[in-house]
Image (cartoon, coloured by chain):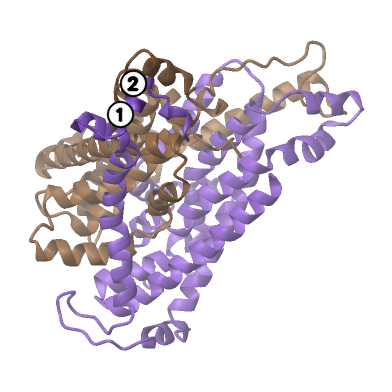
Chain colours: A purple, B brown
């Protein structure tokens, strides 16, 4: 913006910098931005380029071991791997979409409940904040005890109503839904906060106009509030899906290496971690990560395009 | 303006006489009770597991295995004594605190001016580069980092941990501060410059003092995310720099789990951050929703 360059007239008359401070003021744009960008560049862009390079080599065993350039062979290996890779893709998609769907619906309901002022609002807000700030690994451990098949409180509660105990985390087909439940517990509050901020910033008029026209609560929500909330909803989906795709802490804390003995919670992130740091297959791991990264970028691209469409 | 930065300020009031969001067949009172009831359920669902965590940390392992002692048990601080004395936990608490504190401070130092420049000069592309860090799976950076830093014999030291946690903190701070600076009027700085301050002087003397609230928000959130971070510390920390989330795993072995100790350790990690959140909730909420309502 040129607006902020309104220096006093005397300064503008002398364009050649005379002192360091003059020079700094003239170049403050990059002086301010450069340190952070260099940091990010060195710590992110360079490693990312390296990951691309590694994905084209047969690097394994030790990161220092010599490796050969093998072209796209790793990608072929990975993409034809129906044993670990594609199931991991499926689990990642299942985890992300299920968690996201439940969190959005539940988050919207809770945000609507909290919308209008009420007594004790502050306490509900505190409660909503607690799962959000709780350390994910600790949360994973906490649920691990609650869902323990033998001593866990979850099965004890089921016992009170006469339902037989469930294997929860130890079951081959119940483990992933159980971790999704944990994600929902921890991150629905995030969706609530974002949507609530959106709701409170809405103008009252459209809602009241609809009310005057005789629309009922359901109609007002679906035809007035929800369309107006779409930009905020998309932001919430965007933020939550980025993190859900990359979930690691809870899965590792509850099921450990490889996503359990049958890889029942092995998502792409857990798979890539295992390949890198348990099996030291850096070449293949890098190929998995590049594919994973492309999936995330594609996902974001679709969402942000929608966002622009929703908010011209 | 981003109204999201002031979420606590409720200016709107429901119109008198007409109940807000009433369902037609239900009376005003019925909705009121429905709302109170559902909110109690929500609060319970969110807090009960945490209460369970704390309660279990006060049980002996024998009591944890005893269904009869689910609620009726004699609380004991034994697990905490074990955790804090036998397992070096004071060292881990210090490590966690130190890494989170330094990485937050350095990220603020780098991030606030960057966010200012990106907001004032609308450096969209530059901002995108920094925000990319939120999108990239952390593991794709860990292998190269591990390679470089182990060659430099730095793995297991604080420097690497702090750098890796800055990777989490910096984009967060830039994101929050950008939306904060976007909402700040330019006129204040401009008039300061008319009065004879240099642009950098105006930033230092006018903008920075006014953005203390935003920096607090960004700093607290960065601290929390760094404190809770697990994956980077799992790979990059050493025996002497282990942070709390990694240290929790000491209670899990192949044969069995020391549940009491594990729950006490989990409580030790979680409680400090919850206390911080309790006192700074206004800032956390505004940080988490920063920019969300701009559309």
Q: Is residue A30 above or below residue A284?
A: above
* Mark 1 burial class by Cα count in 10 Å: few <14, some 14-19, many 20+: few
Disc 2 target residue = A10
In which quadrant of the rendered view does residue A83 lie? bottom left
- The label number, if any, that marks residue B59 in the structure image: none
Q: Is residue A200 above or below residue A107?
A: above
**Outermost residue toward the right in this view:** A213
Pinpoint the chain carrying mark 2: A
Dots 1 and 2: beta carbons under 8 Å? Answer: yes
Q: Is residue A308 left or right of residue A44?
A: right
Tell me residue A271's x, y (percent): 38, 70
Residue A81 or residue B181, whichever sits in front: B181
Q: Say if residue A226 shows up in the picture.
A: yes
Residue B98 or residue B93, whichever sits in front: B98
Q: Is residue B47 above or below residue A86?
A: above
Q: Is residue B230 left or right of residue B1?
A: left
Disc 1 target residue = A14
In which quadrant of the rendered view does residue A55 lie? bottom left
Disc 2 secondary structure class: helix
Kindly indicate whether the residues beneath marks 1 and 2 are on one polypeptide chain: yes
In which quadrant of the rendered view does residue B93 lie? top left
Tell me residue B153's x, y (percent): 7, 61
Q: Identify the residue at horizontal 88%, vertical 31% (top origin).
A: A215
Q: Say if residue B52 shows up in the picture.
A: no
Give the CA distance from mark 1 to mark 2.
7 Å
* Mark 2 burial class by Cα count in 10 Å: few <14, some 14-19, many 20+: few
Tell me residue B10's x, y (percent): 60, 17
Q: Is residue A169 above or below residue B276?
A: below
Residue B283 or residue B207, whichever sits in front: B207
- Number of numbered discs overlaid on the protein picture: 2
Pinpoint the chain carrying mark 1: A
Q: Identify the residue at horizontal 15%, vertical 80% (top origin).
A: A65
């Amino acid at each position: 913006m040129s607006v902020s360059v309104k220096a006093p007239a005397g300064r503008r008359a002398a364009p050649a910098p005379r002192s360091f401070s003059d020079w700094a003021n003239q170049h403050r744009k990059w002086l301010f931005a450069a340190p952070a960008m260099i940091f990010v560049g060195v710590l992110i862009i360079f490693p990312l380029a390296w990951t691309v390079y590694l994905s084209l080599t047969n690097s394994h065993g030790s990161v220092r071991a010599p490796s050969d350039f093998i072209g796209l062979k790793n990608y072929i290996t990975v993409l034809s791997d129906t044993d670990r890779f594609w199931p991991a893709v499926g689990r990642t998609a299942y985890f992300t979409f299920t968690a996201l769907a439940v969190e959005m619906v539940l988050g919207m309901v809770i945000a609507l409940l909290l919308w209008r002022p009420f007594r004790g609002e502050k306490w509900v807000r505190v409660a909503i904040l607690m799962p959000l700030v709780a350390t994910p690994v600790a949360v994973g451990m906490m649920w691990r005890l609650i869902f323990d098949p033998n001593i866990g409180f979850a099965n004890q509660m089921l016992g009170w109503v006469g339902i037989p105990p469930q294997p929860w985390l130890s079951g081959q087909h119940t483990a992933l839904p159980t971790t999704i439940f944990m994600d929902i517990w921890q991150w629905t509050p995030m969706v609530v906060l974002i949507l609530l901020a959106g709701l409170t910033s809405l103008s009252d008029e459209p809602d009241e106009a609809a009310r005057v026209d005789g629309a009922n609560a359901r109609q007002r929500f679906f035809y007035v509030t929800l369309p107006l909330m779409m930009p905020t909803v998309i932001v919430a989906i965007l933020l939550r899906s980025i993190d859900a795709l990359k979930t690691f802490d809870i899965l590792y804390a509850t099921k450990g290496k490889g996503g359990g003995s049958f890889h029942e919670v092995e998502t792409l992130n857990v798979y890539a971690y295992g390949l890198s740091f348990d099996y030291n297959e850096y070449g293949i791991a890098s190929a998995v990560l590049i594919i994973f990264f492309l999936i995330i970028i594609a996902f974001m691209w679709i969402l942000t395009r929608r966002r622009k469409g929703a908010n011209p | 303006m981003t109204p999201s930065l002031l979420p606590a300020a409720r200016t709107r009031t429901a119109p008198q006489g007409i109940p807000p969001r009433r369902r037609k067949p239900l009376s005003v009172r019925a909705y009121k009770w429905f709302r109170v009831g559902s909110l109690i359920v929500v609060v319970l669902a969110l807090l009960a597991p945490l209460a369970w965590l704390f309660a279990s940390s006060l049980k002996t392992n024998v009591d944890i295995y005893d269904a009869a002692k689910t609620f009726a048990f004699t609380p004991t601080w034994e697990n905490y004594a074990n955790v804090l004395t036998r397992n070096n936990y004071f060292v881990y608490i210090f490590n966690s605190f130190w890494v989170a504190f330094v990485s937050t401070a350095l990220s603020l130092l780098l991030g606030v001016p960057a966010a200012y420049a990106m907001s004032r000069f609308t450096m969209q592309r530059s901002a995108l580069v920094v925000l990319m860090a939120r999108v990239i799976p952390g593991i794709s950076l860990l292998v190269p980092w591990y390679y470089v830093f182990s060659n430099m014999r730095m793995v297991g030291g604080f420097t690497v941990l702090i750098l890796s946690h800055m990777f989490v903190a910096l984009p967060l701070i830039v994101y929050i501060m950008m939306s904060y600076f976007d909402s700040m009027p330019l006129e204040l700085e401009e008039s300061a410059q008319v009065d004879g301050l240099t642009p950098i002087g105006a930033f230092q003397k006018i903008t920075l003092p006014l953005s203390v609230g935003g920096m607090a928000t960004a700093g607290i959130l960065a601290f929390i995310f760094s404190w809770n971070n697990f994956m980077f510390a799992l790979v990059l920390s050493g025996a002497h720099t282990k942070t709390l989330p990694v240290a929790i795993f000491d209670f899990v072995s192949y044969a069995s789990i020391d549940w009491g100790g594990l729950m006490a350790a989990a409580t030790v990690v979680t409680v400090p951050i919850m206390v911080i959140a309790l006192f700074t909730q206004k800032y956390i909420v505004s940080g988490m929703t920063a920019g969300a309502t701009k559309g």
